[in-house]
Amino acid sequence: QVQLVESGGGLVQAGGSLRLSCAASGSIFSINAMGWYRQAPGKQRDLVATITTGGSANYADSVKGRFTISRDNAKKRVYLQMNSLKVEDTAVYYCHADRVVVPTGIGDYWGQGTQVTVSS
């Protein structure tokens, strides 16, 4: 059983910073890309940032220059440093692990989500 557990969400004023963390646990042999997605009320879930095993990062245009994704492969953790937060960044943020190799096969997994609220 693979679990992704996020932490670090909360309430912050516009212009502030938050750091999200996600830890993967279970009988995991390897994980391909890891990333963060977000979903605001009434909207679809959108990509925020992804990072490959080798450290190549990809960002949504809306967060480029403000957010930084990083990863610790040994600890099976992914992080999202969010700076210069805007009200429109308010959403539930979900951790995602792509092509997770476990004893029974390969699959994708999602965390339960962590709320980020940015006030004006």
Image (cartoon, grey):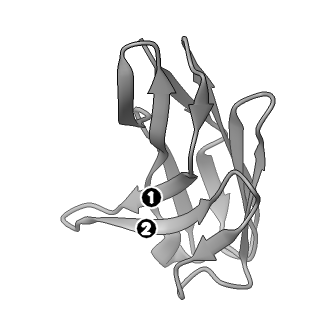
Q: Residue furthest left?
A: 42
**Number of marks in picture:** 2
The residue under the point 45% across, 13% down is 103
The residue under the point 76% across, 70% down is 83
Q: Which quadrant of the figure has residue 49?
A: bottom right
The residue under the point 61% across, 31% down is 30
Residue occupied by mark 2 = 47
83 horizontally vs 112: left or right: right
46 horizontally vs 100: left or right: left
What's the amino acid at mark 1?
A: Tyr
The residue under the point 60% across, 74% down is 58
Are the residues flagged by discs 2 and 1 in contact, CB closer than 8 Å? yes
Examine the rendered structure and indicate whether residue 91 appears above or below residue 83: above
Q: Position of residue 15 (x, y in %)?
A: 73, 76
Determine whether the residue tagged by mark 1 lies in a helix, strand or loop. strand
Whole-number angstrom distance, CA of label 2 to CA of label 1: 4 Å
The quarter of the rendered structure image containing the N terminus is top left
- Which mark is on residue 37? 1
Q: Position of residue 112 (x, y in %)?
A: 40, 32
Examine the rendered structure and indicate whether residue 18 appears above or below residue 114: below
Q: Residues within 10 Å of mark 2 (few under 14, many from 20)?
A: some
- Which mark is on residue 68? none
